[in-house]
Amino acid sequence: MKIQTIVGAAMAAAALALAGCASDRTAASGQSTSRTAGEFTSDAALTAKVKTAIANDAGLGSAVDINVNSYKGIVQLNGFVASADQIQRAVSAAQGVNGVTRVDNNLQVKQ
């Protein structure tokens, strides 16, 4: 539990330090594709929560082979796990995190 708190605090600190790196890009539709500092920080916090949930709730240990990315509530899971059951458990754990609106699952079973 202590490591989770430290990891979460480190992720939040990194997000705050990098918040100024967001640029204001405009998509072809005319809508801004950039994130505000607050959105960037929220995405980083959501990523940390999802990684913690996968490690704890799904029973996948450190889940080092699963990469988690978040963007405005959409979570993308990438990487490799040992079984199809672990994929389902990781997706379920991610879906259970408050603030997640959608999970894009790109996990694959290791050969």
Image (cartoon, helix red, strand yellow):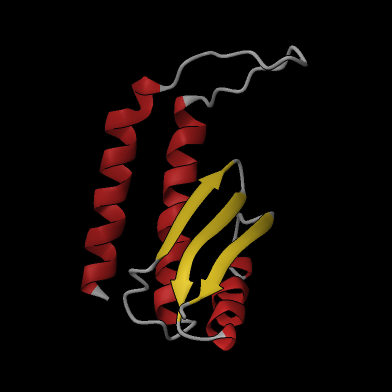
Q: In this view, does 73 lie to the left or right of 59?
A: right
Between residues 87 and 30, which one lies in front from this camera angle? 87
**Residue under the point 49% across and 44% down:** 43
**Residue under the point 62% across and 56% down:** 100
User: Where does the image place residue 73, in percent across and percent down from the top left?
Assistant: 61, 48
Most extreme residue toward the right, as rendered?
29
User: Where does the image place residue 69, in percent across and percent down from the top left?
Assistant: 49, 50
> Where 36 falls versus 41 (above or below)?
above
Identify the image quadrant of residue 5. bottom left
> Where 70 falls versus 40 (above or below)?
below
Identify the image quadrant of residue 92. bottom right
Q: Is residue 90 left or right of residue 51?
A: right
User: Where does the image place residue 89, in percent across and percent down from the top left?
Assistant: 57, 81
**Residue under the point 37% across and 27% down:** 19
User: Where does the image place residue 90, in percent across and percent down from the top left?
Assistant: 54, 75
Screen quadrant of the N terminus: bottom left
Q: Is residue 80 left or right of residue 25?
A: left
**Residue under the point 27% across and 31% down:** 17
Q: In this view, does 59 lie to the left or right of 30?
A: left
Label count reads: 0
